[in-house]
Amino acid sequence: MRRPVKAFYLIQPYFRENLSRVVTGLFCLILVDILQLFIPRVLKRAVDDLTAFRAGSRDLMGYALIIVALALAIGIFRYGWRLRLIGLSRRVEEGLRNRLFSHIQSLDAAYFDRTPAGDLMAHATNDIQNVRMAAGMGLVALTDAVVLGAAAIGFMAYIHVRLTFFVLLPMPLIAVSTRFFSKRMHRLYQNAQQVFSEMTETVRERFAGIRIVKAYTWEKHDARDMERISRRYVRTNMALARIIQSFFPLMLFFANLSLVCVLFFGGRQTIRFAITPGDFVAFISYLGLLTWPMMALGWVTNLIQRGGASLERIESILKTSPQVVPVAPGNALRAAGHDLSFRGVAFSYPMPKASEKGHPALKNVHLAVPWGTVLGIVGPPGAGKSTLLRLIPRLYDVSSGAVTLGNTDIRRLDLEWLRGRIAFMPQEAFLFADTIERNITLGRPHVSEKKLREALKMAALDKTLRELPDGLKTLVGEKGVTLSGGQKQRVALARALLLDAPLLILDDPISQVDTATGHQIIRSLASFARKKTLIIVSHRLSVFAIADRIIVMDQGRIVDSGTHARLVESNPYYRHTHQLQVLEEAFHAR
């Protein structure tokens, strides 16, 4: 069991924090083990008195009351250790889950690009549950195996040393078989957890896309996929079950070998009067107590292998360092101004394997955006527009070059301070399964009613809310499923406008709204001119009527820039797009 123990350092802090709980729980557990050892001694005296015809009704009642008292004490102390040690395992579970969740939140966007959400869900549920069992019942079973086992052997040796030697003959076989089975258990637990992660991700993805599945009548295909991965999960767990179910009967077989030795050799000793009948009964009782530690040894192995395999999977996440590393608090800076610039910026998205090189998304970008500027960004799909925006709040870090704010490289700025000065509306309008109000305020419960109403009006959402029966309290469902695309987009826009940050970054903010609503939003955005820096990516060129400058991107480069009028004259892509949109608007105006 050498390998999985390495990862158990992750839960040591929780044991140190709850040291008094651990000590109290172990004390109660050891008392339970000790008290159990006295019951065979009572039985010995009772049997000896009965065989010698010395026991009367009062004597037997006395023995019975002693056993009842011992059982009552055992029950009280057993409640104590369960409360303490099982409670400890729950605290380990809570602490490890919080630590894992906090660490996952600290990882950068690149990590989530290559890690399925279902895999993370499996770590946060099944893996942590396995660790809890190892930390709780694993500790209990290990203590029982050591304390109860050693004490039972001591009491048996006190009765008859040579008979105890015969009982212990199967012990080396137990040690060898435990080592043999533990290695295979660990490998199979790793495989089972990996398949469980894949199955969780498959279920999550299919349920998230259930509407597409139904629209394309893909249910049978999905069912076959699910059946295939379920069969893999069953096969992996059946292989694991075969190992476990071979291990436990083997432990029981060795325990019964010891019983055979006691019956044969102990019976002969009793016939020869080398030991009393009470000693013989007590010896069998102690062997019964020793059977549990022998079985517990198998259970401990099972729990530790399962918990160790899960801890190794959790450890692999906790050891993952974010590529976007915040500056240490003592070295973090705050920009002197809000002038933004890109200086020779190049960027490639990280690949799943470090040895692989990603296709460059940005190449040698030079761009200056003075504070108060309204900058428009346009270009064909895949030109690098959204990527350029993601570099500003450091969702990713540049591969080369630098992005500066107030002439300070943003990698030297305090990350929380930087993002607090940016209101970012991504291209995908993601909504949480909550009310519209909570999706807009997003953790800011004390937003004034006036500011909220202003944000709703600027996002052209106020009239829409009046049509909804619950208004701001309307529940939007998972990913905003109860709202239209345009409504979701405007909720996301209101969220960004409510933040009132010096830098407002909008990625395609009017792509899913009608022309009239789009013009209303554009007029609202125009009020920010000279008051904050506004950077807008859009395929709808009408939004650039308020822009001081527009850049045209293609294949990760800035290929042209200028005002709307100049680009209509000189840039073929911009002119062609503009002409098509003018014709489209004229057609819809009829």
Image (spheres, rainbow, N blue to C red):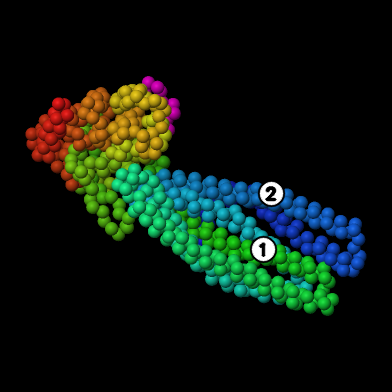
Residue 445 lies in the magenta stretch: yes
Seen at 49% across and 50% down, the residue is 125
Quadrant of the image occupied by residue 59: bottom right
Using residue 478 as the reference point, say whether residue 558 is left or right of it: left
Give the residue at mark 1. 292
Q: Nearer the viewer, residue 409 or 577?
A: 577
The residue lying furthest to the left in this view is 569
In screen coordinates, is 60 left or right of 248?
right
Picture coordinates of residue 307 (x, y %)?
53, 57
Q: Residues within 10 Å of mark 2 (few under 14, many from 20)?
A: some
Q: Position of residue 247 (x, y in %)?
A: 57, 68
Q: Answer whether residue 239 is visible to the viewer in this image.
A: yes
- State whether residue 1 appears in this view: no
Pinpoint residue 381: horizontal percent, then vertical percent. Answer: 20, 43
Q: Residue at x 84, y 58 (%)?
A: 63
Is disc 1 placed on a helix, strand or loop?
Answer: helix
Residue identified by numbered label 2: 80
Please determine whether, in this image, residue 169 is positioned above or below residue 62.
below
Name the residue located 23 percent from the left edge and 30 percent from the top edge.
514
